[in-house]
Image (tube, rainbow, N blue to C red):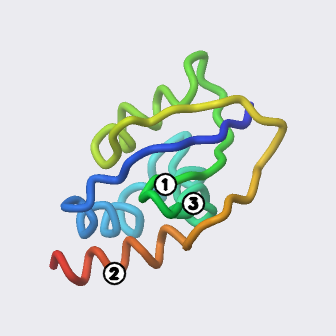
Amino acid sequence: MHYRVRARFREPMAAAFRRALRETIPRQQPDGEEIVDSMRRAVVTGDGTVEWSEACYCPTPLQHERSTVYDRYFDDLTTETVEGYETHDGAPFLAHLDRLAESNG
């Protein structure tokens, strides 16, 4: 299934999340590459919400992804079933993450 995901990023975690996206998350099974690809699709909206779409086959939406990654870095995460991957309006999340990581150091 595909989901539209919305969440609030924990900005003080920017450097740790950026490092994890590069070093450990891609190797995570079974969903590491999908998490990385989802963050590439993610945008930051005008109110600071991060939005992305993601495929997941857990019985509970993003169950494994949340327990291993998302609940560490995001708050107020919500999901909504959608037909497929979507594009969202906003600034690219990874560029935002890089800026935060550099400024929070």
Q: Are marks 3 and 2 in contact (CB under 8 Å)?
A: no
Q: Which residue is disc 1 drawn over?
A: 50
Of the two numbered discs 3 and 2 on the same chain, state the one appearing first in sequence: 3
Quarter of the picture containing the C terminus is bottom left
- Label pair 3/1, CB-CB below 8 angstroms: yes
Determine whether 2 is above or below 45 in the image.
Answer: above
Three-letter code, disc 3: Ala
- Which residue lies at the image location 55% right of the left edge and 40% below the top edge? 30
User: What percent of the width, then of the height, locates residue 84?
Assistant: 81, 43
Q: Residue sitting at 66 percent across and 64 percent down?
A: 89
Mark pair 2, 1: CA separation: 15 Å
Nearer the observer, 61 or 58: 61
Q: Residues within 10 Å of mark 1 (few under 14, many from 20)?
A: many
Horizontal side, residue 25 vs residue 15: left or right: right
Residue 42 bears which disc, if any? 3
Using the image, tell me which numbered label, if any, was put on residue 103.
none
Q: Residue furthest left?
A: 105
* Quadrant in which the N terminus is drawn: top right
Q: Amino acid at mark 2?
A: Arg
Q: How many C-alpha atoms fall within 10 Å of the one at disc 2: few (<14), some, or many (≥20)?
A: some
Mark 3: few/some/many CA within 10 Å (<14, 14-19, 20+): many
Task: Count the numbered circles shown.
Answer: 3
Say which element carries label 3.
loop
Amino acid residing under circle 1: Val
Pointer 2: what residue?
99
In which quarter of the view is residue 4 placed? Answer: top right
